[in-house]
Every structure is written in C-alpha cells, then in structure tokens.
Amino acid sequence: MAAQKVARLISERSIGRLSLYRRLLNVLQGEGVRNIYSHQLAAMAGCTAAQVRRDLMAVGYSGSPTHGYEVPRLIESLREFLDAPGGQGVALVGVGNLGKAILSYFTGRRPNLQIAAAFDSDPYKVNRVIHGCRCYSMEHLAEVAEGQGIRLAIITVPAQAAQAVADALVQAGVRGILNFAPVRLRVPDHVHVEDIDMTVSLEKVAYFARQSAERGSRP
Amino acid sequence: MAAQKVARLISERSIGRLSLYRRLLNVLQGEGVRNIYSHQLAAMAGCTAAQVRRDLMAVGYSGSPTHGYEVPRLIESLREFLDAPGGQGVALVGVGNLGKAILSYFTGRRPNLQIAAAFDSDPYKVNRVIHGCRCYSMEHLAEVAEGQGIRLAIITVPAQAAQAVADALVQAGVRGILNFAPVRLRVPDHVHVEDIDMTVSLEKVAYFARQSAERGSRP
C-alpha cells in the first residue's frame, strides 16, 4: 500500500528515467555487470546521481553504500514497479508506413507490452496479419478492445484523422495513448497522452546544427 | 544581424514549439484560415498565449492586436527563421525496419530537410535504392557526407552500435543527430543530439494508464 501511494506521486520525468534505467541495466546485465553505483547509472542516463537515488527510492530497493545496487535485483524491482502483473495489450491505429514500422519495432520486444490488435480503414488491410498482428476494421474497435482488455493505444494515422481516432479510443475504454500524429489531442483527464513528433525533433536538430556551424565552433 | 543574435539565445523548447506552430499553421492554411490570435495557436499547441507571443517575437513578425497574425506571413517568417536557405541534407544510418520506416516517413515530406544518403553495414543493402534513397557502405560515410555537404544524421542502429556510429558521424563533420537508439550518446559540445525513445514513451503511457485505472477515475 505504501508503494502504491508513492507511485501516485511520482512525476512523468521520473517514470521516463526509471524506464531508461531498466533498458540500460538490461544492456549491462548482458555484459555480465553485477553491481552499479548511482553515479555510474547517472552518467549513462544523462542525469545526476542524486536524481537516480531519488527515482529508485520510489521502487523500493535502495542498494548499499559500499556495493551500490545489485543489477539483477534492481531490474526485478523496476519490473515489479513498471510492469502490470499480467501484461498490457496495446492497439495500434493506422497501418501505413509508420504504423507498420512501429508494429515491426515492438513485435516481440516487450513481452509485457504487446501490440495485440491493429486497426485501419483500408479494406485491403483489414483481416490481414501484418508483422504477426491481425488488422481489424475501425468499426470493430470497441468490440476488439473490450474482448482483449486493451487499455493502451498507439496512433499512427495522419494529422487530420487523429482526433476522431482518439475520441473513438477513449470511447472504447483506452486510458493511455502514444501519439505520433502532429496534433495536440483533446482527451479527458483520466487519459494519459505521450506525443512523439519526429519532424519537430529533426527540425530542432537542423536548427541547432546550423547555429553551431554559423558560430564556427567546431574545434 | 539582430535576428541572428536573438536566434542564438533561443531555447530548445522554443525551437520545438516554433516547429510545431508551423505544422499547425500549415494545416490551418489548408483549411482556408487567414488570421489567428496567439491564444488560438496556444490552445492548439498546448502552451500559453504569452509563450506563443514570446516565441514568435524571435522570428521577427509580431502581428496586430486587432487582427492577430496573418497565417501566410507567419508561415513565411517561420520558414525564414527555421530553414536553411539552400536546404540541409540528412544521412540515415541503419536501414533496418525502423530505418526504412523513417526513410519512408521523411521522403518528400520536408523538401528543405531531405534524407540524401543512407548507410548500412549489410552488403545486401549497399548500393540499393530504398524509398528513393541510395544506401552506401559505412566505409564511404566521410566521403559521401563531404561530397553532399551533409551535416545532419539520423541514427537507427541497435543500441550496441550507436556510439561507434555517432563517433564516425562526428568525424565526418556531422553537427546534429536525431538518435533513435536507446543510449545517451557522448558527442563534442558543438554537436546537437535529440533522442527519441519509443519504448520509454510507451512504458510511460502504460504506467500512467494503469495508475488511472487503479484510481478508478473514469467517469
């Protein structure tokens, strides 16, 4: 119960860092690393050691001052904290180029977070199995989501279609959306949205790279 | 010159928002909208009207208190501010599923920001044209980047390969990297890196959706 209460107060940035720590720890474990100090994890994650210790306090495993954190125990604590016990099914809406890529990227990657169903309005795609995932018509969204207990969705439709898709997802009981469409979705308070905008990110890179070139700051 | 000085002081977040304003304005222009107020743009971009006005001050077009901003003029001002006059070429390294998707996503989308060359270590992919883009061997990175004046790159290789690829890109004169690999890249100060981690984003969505379900806050 105490852990639950802490969990509810934790910030979005902390959750993002906890997820990143786990990915870094999995790589380390694969390389045979058994122990790690907060300052080492901080260097890899691009934050401070104090932040690492504060973030990890919430997951309920605090390590030792002399040996740091035991990597397998820390991974296990993060798993218990981040993952739903029985796994969570995800719907993907929009099986265009981006949607297919996301399907292929996530297939088999996170057994606890599987894309269980895909949706598209193109009759040619409906009923096909794409990257191991069955594609349904949008009309069957509510039915499939209820049948499979889906509460998470990924939106990979064009900008103009995204809000209508979000509305349908919320209607079908979805509570979390990863949105790749370049629009700010309007959703009720109980629905969490994360946006990924690849064009905005590339334009930022381009802008600052140009500034750096104009300053002539290359050594 | 004054605009240049302002440009150097502008924050990463402001540049991200300016890029987003432009995308939203392009959609509005397509719908025939001619004028817009800062509070309307703010509502669409998920920020405050004061932020919109402050961000747009940097681009040198301030609109009018009675008619707001003229959409075509604002788009033009944003283009002058954000885009390099002759366009900027981008290299993509790692032509796996994600790399192919990114290629297909960006092809023809931003004429000013084109993926000019792709690179992979797989001999089967080298010299093929994938989504309109020629794929080269990694050995030719420096040569192709110099020949085509490439200063930007997208990394879509697996985590273990990403740092070596970043080192090679920096060596080849790249100053901006959009990184999809789940590692924090070590690069010199003059190189700007943006990270996109789809797994971390999906795990955040899953975590907060579950919290919302446990609170039972759905109306």
Image (spheres, coloured by chain):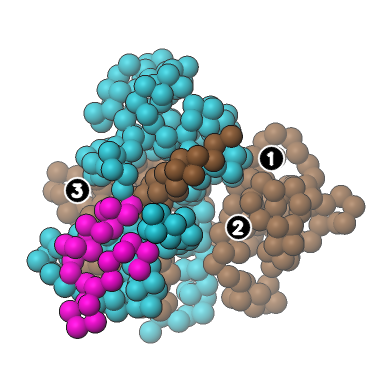
Chain colours: A cyan, B brown
A181 to the left or right of A120: right
Please tell me which of labels 1 and 2 falls first in the chain. 2
Mark 1: few/some/many CA within 10 Å (<14, 14-19, 20+)? some
Q: Amino acid at mark 2?
A: Arg
Label 1 marks a residue whose chain is B
Q: Which residue is mark 1?
A: B28
Judged by depth in the image, the label closer to the viewer, 3 or 1, is: 1
- In the displayed structure, A50 sits above or below A183; it is below
Query: Between residues B106 and A107, which one lies in front from this camera angle?
Result: A107
Residue B17: mark in rendering: 2
Start-end of magenta stretch: A57-82
Query: Which x, y percent locates residue B76?
Result: 68, 53
Work out how far the residue at label 3 is from the one at label 1, CA to CA, in angstroms.
Answer: 41 Å
Q: Which residue is mark 3?
A: B126
Where disc 3 sits, the SS reads: loop
Q: Amino acid at mark 3?
A: Val
Query: Between residues A88 and A125, which one lies in front from this camera angle?
Result: A88
Instruction: Evaluate whether label 1 is on the same chain as label 2.
Output: yes
B90 to the left or right of B113: left
